[in-house]
Amino acid sequence: MPKNTKSSATSGTRKKNARKAALGVPPPEVPVVAKQKKQKGQKKEPRKKVYILPSKPAPPQPDPLDTLGLVHRLPPELVIILRSLGKKDPVTKGRALEELQSQWIDESSRKGDESVECDALVTMLPVWFHRAPVFFTHPVRRIRLLAAALHFSYVRIPAVRDAAIFFLRETATSEQIETLMGTWCMLAYDVDRQVSVQGQKSWSSITSPGVDEETVVNVEMLASIMEFLQRTLLDPPGVYLYLNPAAPVAAPTPGIKKPSGRFIPATLNEELESNKADEESDLDRNARLRYGALSAFRWLFDARLASKITSLDDLSGLLSNPLFWTSLCCSEHAPWIPDPELRSLGHGQPQVRQATWALLSMLLQRYKGTIEPFIPILSTVLLRSAWVETDSGVRNALFQPALIFLKEFPNAWILEGTYDADKHEDGDDSDSENEEVETKTSPMRKEHSSEAYREFLQFLELGCAGSPVDGYPTVLVVLSTIPSSVSSSRTRMPLDDFFTSFWAAIDGRALSSLERKVPSASFLSSLLECLAFFLRRLLSGSQDHEVLSGSVSDDLMPNTTRLQDVADGLVRSQFTRIWQELKARRLRTDDRDVGKLIASSLLSLHRMNIDLFTTAWDTVSSAILSQEDESLSLIPTVLRTFVDTFETKGLPAEVTRTLMSKYVQETVGKCETVLASNATSARVSKNIGVVITLIETFGSHLFQHIDFAVRMDNMFVNNAFRILQASPQAISAFMSRRNDEDLCVELWHVLLVDVSQQLDMLSSLLDVIGANIFPEYLRPEDGELDGVIEHLLIEVLNGDASTSRSDLLKRLIQAQNFFLSENGKDILFQTLVSSLSSIVDDILYTTNAPFTGLATAIEFTRIMLSKNSELASDSLASILPNVFIVGYLLPVTFPMLETSIIETARGVWNLWVSKADVRLQGVLSGLIKEKLKELLRDCSTYIRPEDILTLSGHKPNGIDVTPLADIFPTPGDFNIILDSLPSDPPDPSLAFIESVIPAISEFENPNISGLEFDSRGYSLYIRVTSALLAYLGDNRSIAKENMWALRHILILGQYSNDALRVPATPSGLFGPDVSRSELRRLLGKVHQLSTYLLSTGDDGLHNQVVSACMSTRATTSSDALVSFVVDIVNHAQRGDVVRDALVLRSVLKHLFASSSKTDSDQWLNLARRLEKTAPQTAVAILASITEFAPEPLKMDRYRNEIASDILGVPASRANTTGVVLLRRLAATAPDSDSDVVFLPQQRAVNVVKTWQAWVSSDEDIDEDVESMMPLLFMHLSPILQNVAGNHWEFMFDVVENNLENCSFADSATLTMLGRSLRLILAIQDLVMTNKPLRANWDARKESILVLVKNLVSTKIDNTDRSEPRSLCRELALAVIQGLPDTLVNEKTLPEMCHLLTDPSYEVQRMGYSLLHKAARKRTEHFVIECAVDTDDGVSAELPAELLAILQSNFLPTEEFYDSESDNIEIDLSELCKVSGYLLAWMIMFDLFIDASIKVRSQYFNQMRSLGIIGDFFIPNVFGFLGLFNGKKKAFKLDIWAVDDFFIDHLEPESVLSLRLLAAHIYHRALLTVPALIRAWISDCSDRQLLLRVVDYTASYFSPGIIRAELAQVRADSSSELHTTENLVIKVSPSAGEVTASYTVDDQVLELSLRLPNDWPLHRLDIRDTKMVGVSEDRWRAWVLGVQQIVWQQNGRIVDGLTVFTKNVTLHFAGQVECAICYSIISVMDSSLPQKPCKTCKNRFHASCLYKWFKSSHSSSCPLCRSDIL
């Protein structure tokens, strides 16, 4: 441009306008005119200012939908989607892209090119190409990803691809091509990896050659793409604005003027996209676009080369633009751009810088020849950017291009130093004034220091800027390109400056990372390389490098000498510094690497200059001989490396050998001196450590020198123990490398002798052996440590040793060959065997034996056996059975046994069994089976038989156990054990339950003593039989093959049943603590197995059995069941005892289930045959036939024969023959509900007459006869009910006599009592339909019922559970259920309270019905007495017997909390106690029913004084409800109603039923005694419990109570509330409120009571809404009275309102109130003030006066103080 037309605007102004201008309009061409030199002194012409117009923003591009009319050619659905693509909302755009992909492109791909969708997609191509650039550069990543995927799918459609190619080649304008292809290319290189992958697919598909080997992208299109990328690089905001032009802003809407005159401006609805949450910032957007453009440029350069375009002339404007290269700079302002307003393009954007370095690397590799014009600017930007980079990722990317550039263009440092930013900035604007300034400053530029070199030194100071591993290998390459003049331009001491910067990384801890060895090695290697490099330059003789020696002042010495001195000083200083840092461990490098690097450097110096090598070697050797390094291995390792690296001949090898000799002699000498003195262990350890390190480094080669070997031998043998104390590794290193067996054995013996005196050093000695380099031939000579180790083993096994001693012993045993003699090993093994056996026996037979000793013993067993692989069979047989017990049996019995113990024991067993031969396996199997058999029969062990069976089922390796043959006793042994046991039942009362059992006079002593019980309370027979039951129950096929076992199993069931029925009676077979649940489980299993084994008989079984039993020969049947039944019958008739008779009855019960009348006749014949020889067996058969079999045809005749025989028995034989006949006749009696007639009527009358004759005779009739008569009377009474005679009087006499002679306490009379009570119940049933009999019964009824009542009222001290006693009590209660009112009085309740403690549920339930009636009777009595009492002499007291029951505490087990169902296993006796306790509270609250205020108040006061609610009720009931165990454990009552409970439906065995009863009782307590519950609430200090109780009550109880209170107020129409005139009661159920309104002369006096949500735990709200005609004091007294009745006196709302009504009514009627309480009605007894004062004439309530007298301690009037009494 001519000078006279040049703009007067400054450079900054021009750049600012250029940045604002759109780059789409090319700048006008400016002709270049040669500069003319300005004459000296000529003035500079002033510049003319010319205004440069900023470019207008590009207008919005028209939508092809409208301009091309495509809106009418495309389907409406597609048009809607395309319109949505033009919206600004990213969500709308994304949804439109997804719909376009799924509904059109995917459908077109599925249907093919002929589809409507494909035609539409081809038609819409201009619209998509118009929208695509916006999507390809969109700020939202999801939009770009969707667009890239859609674009690939779109252009992959063949028809669309053809249309796109045609559009790009023929139709599209240059601007469209530039925008579309430029953004498309940038999409393929997007900053996001997923977007880039999708973009690459579509881009490669369009740029790859087609079938005709031509690509769509031609040279012209490459130029367009290049132009767009240039614009994007330099002005990304402008490009983004060009792609997304701003919509025209509409004129603001005028304001609205309201009628009031106030002006309201219109709201501006501005949408600022930059404020959206999903928009990126401007800086991030610019960086993303630049990254895409830079990455796309790499493809562009490849494409240009493919098109054979090698020139960069068209890119010279970009590549020579300093602003473009600021994308390499990490700082905010690039140093080559002087304008402070221009920010670096790479600032804060490491991805942009990384992409620029990658682009530069490509240019250097592909355009090496054409890039030379840009070297000046590249030199500056590269050198000023590379060393200050802060991002590690960018640094990794820049090293390659930087090194390539510096190697190819070594003059870059010179160019960087001469670069003038101002000159480059002004360009053509420089004039003669600038030239003059340049001329003046040119001399100074020669001395100008290089800023790039300064930054390079800072780069070194920072440890290669944090990338030492990658950076230090490049330092030498970079340094080789730096001219000496550049390095010396900053200082006269360039070498000092360089190495100071190099060492600054160590001084500044720049290499202090977690892994420092690799960076430190890189540092040291680079340092030594740089040292060698500088030395070569110094000694090269070049004058250019003499400036490096500036640290030495000029003198008269020759130049060569001066350079040599500088080199020597440099070598000395650097090697000294290196060794100092290595010794101080600030330079942490592997010692071997240090040696290699130093050795390599020394060799390099040796080849370079001998003097330099000598200087370096002297420095290194003096440092080594000083021996002041902290690392013991550094010097030996370095020396070893020198030896390995240097050749055997030559100067380096010679000086190395000399240094080695000196170092070894000095080291050994120091060690000898220290050992000879009294030096500390630390000092000895340090010196010994140096020697050991030396030995370990050089190995056995050192001992080839005789002097060294002798000195070392003497030192170790003479100071063995001290060396061991100081450094155990020294012993190991010496012995492992001293190849002299005799010397090592001698040293070992010395050590063992010394260590035996100090066991603490054994650990150190074991550390020596554990190094795995110890000689294996070392052995003790005389058992030096045998006794010591044995004693240590005993201590450890006894638990007296510490953990460290135990670990020490383990290590000793593992290395026992070094310490123990053969005899010592045997002793140690026997000690271990004995200890293990003792520990196992303790666990098997001792309560709560610890397992700690077992863990130790089994672990040492494993160690011992693992180290003694050649043990004899006898030794193994002595220890392996116990190992088997530990590994397989103990885990079954003790599940808490540690898994490590089990795994160790099993591992030892499996290992040695697999090694054992057949003979040893047989011996071990026999020993183990014998041990298991012994444990099965041993009651003193804690091993259960089921555990042994479980063990056999696991089938351990090496042993096969068959329980029936190997473990259980033989059938003969079972019979021997059984014969020693009692055969009669343990208690005579069992005859009441089982009619087969005879009278007590026939019993032998049923109890035995001296039997031993196991942990479950089982004797020997019960123990083995229960195990047999468990085994056969799981193996029923074996049970069928061994039917003999069923007899013993049935006897087990019989014994268990007896123990359940009368647990308090000792039988000798079960211990006192046997579990009832276990007995029930046994009974269940017995029933299952017996049912299975006895239900498989054929049709001829009965015939075969009876035939065999009636013949004298043994049965020949092959049926096992037939043989078994015959054997059972033979056993029964042979002994004729109750036990065998009951077993026979059990068997026949199963067999008769499928029998016929013929079979019954056969069994009847057998019974008749056995009458004489085995009467007990005959009775058992007869009873079984009668109860289980069909009625035999001959049975009726047989009964008549027995009855006939009875008629002939005189009174003298009634106790003998008569009893037998009576039992036989009773056995044949049919069921009362059957159609079978027992006896003819006349014969029955004769039988009764015979009994009368016996009784009326002078003979003494035994109790057995008297017991049998009621039993038979019960069967005869239906027959004789219509027969006149005195037989009924006789029956009543017998009953009364029996009742008088019986009691519940005497178990011997329970059978007689029970049969008599059953007879009474039978008579009560008969009299209901028989009027004549009822008359006889009424005459004797009262006396009999009194006797029964007295029996029930009698408290039994023995409360143990007894099924016969409970049945008798149930019968007695059933008899007196309809007890006349005349027999029930106020004393009945305390007399019968003990029924609630009975262990029978039925007794408790029936007793409650009777006690409920008695409670109401007692309350009624007290109400009447208190009503007629005028002297307060009657006290309504709670029964002491009932209070004794209630004053009990229960601790509910976890089962109460863990489940709300019935599937719980709890002791039934505990449940029975809980049910009795809860029923006792029911009786307590029953006492309050229909009680007057006075009676109720006395009950309440007594309960409060006893504290029975807070001390017993709350803990127990809340415990049952789970309120003490947290809110989650509380019993949920959501589906249950707690306001009512039916006792008849109570299931005491169900925990759920008991908890519901407890909830109902709590409900009754809240209704009956809420004041006591509130008292506990107020005293509760546990806030969490309090909140839990209140919340629980408010949720489940309060709503029902509030409804009941309000319902009572509303429903009690006969009460005074509803009959009082002028009184209106209003009830609001929804609000829980009651309002009482009293009308006086049209004025309303009103009182409202509001119940809280948690009533009755908190006070009710009493509001005096309207107070008319009443003084405030009197009104307050009335309100207080209501509160006292409801809150303190446990009254109901009705009671409080009633008192309030009386007060109001009497007040307005003129009644005077009490002068003490200011109420007319007493809140204590509802009485009027009737006690007057004779002096002041005031009247008082009697209760108020009593309280006044008691509190004032006088009898004076409270008003006038005169004496009232």
Image: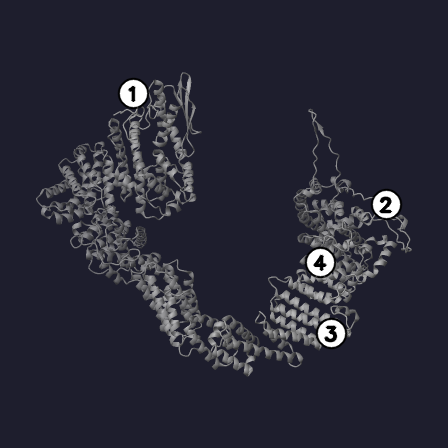
User: Relative to 659, does residue 1405 appear above or below in the rendering?
Assistant: above
| Residue type of the residue flagged with mark 2 | Val
Task: Evaluate whether residue 918 shows in this view.
Answer: no
**Outermost bottom residue:** 706
Q: Secondary structure at mark 1?
A: loop
How far is disc 1 from disc 2 in space, using C-alphas? 126 Å
| Residue type of the residue flagged with mark 4 | Val
Task: Evaluate whether residue 984 shows in this view.
Answer: yes
* Cβ atoms at labels 4 and 2 below 8 Å apart: no
Identify the residue position indicated by label 2 in the image.
50
How far is disc 3 from disc 2 in space, using C-alphas? 66 Å
Q: Secondary structure at mark 2?
A: loop
How far is disc 4 from disc 3 in space, using C-alphas? 35 Å
Give the mark nearest the N terminus, 4 or 2. 2
Identify the residue position indicated by label 1 in the image.
1737
Identify the residue position indicated by label 4 in the image.
388
Toward the viewer: 1363 or 1742?
A: 1742
Identify the residue position indicated by label 3 in the image.
564
Look at the image and name its color scheme.
Answer: one colour
- 10 Å crowding of disc 1: few (<14), some (14-19), many (20+): few
Give the mark nearest the N terminus, 1 or 3. 3
Give the mark nearest the N terminus, 3 or 2. 2
- Residue 1716's x, y, as percent? 33, 26
Q: Would you identify the image quadrant in which residue 367 lies?
A: bottom right
- Residue 862's x, y, as percent? 41, 68
Give the mark nearest the N terminus, 1 or 2. 2
**Outermost front residue:** 556
| Residue type of the residue flagged with mark 1 | Lys
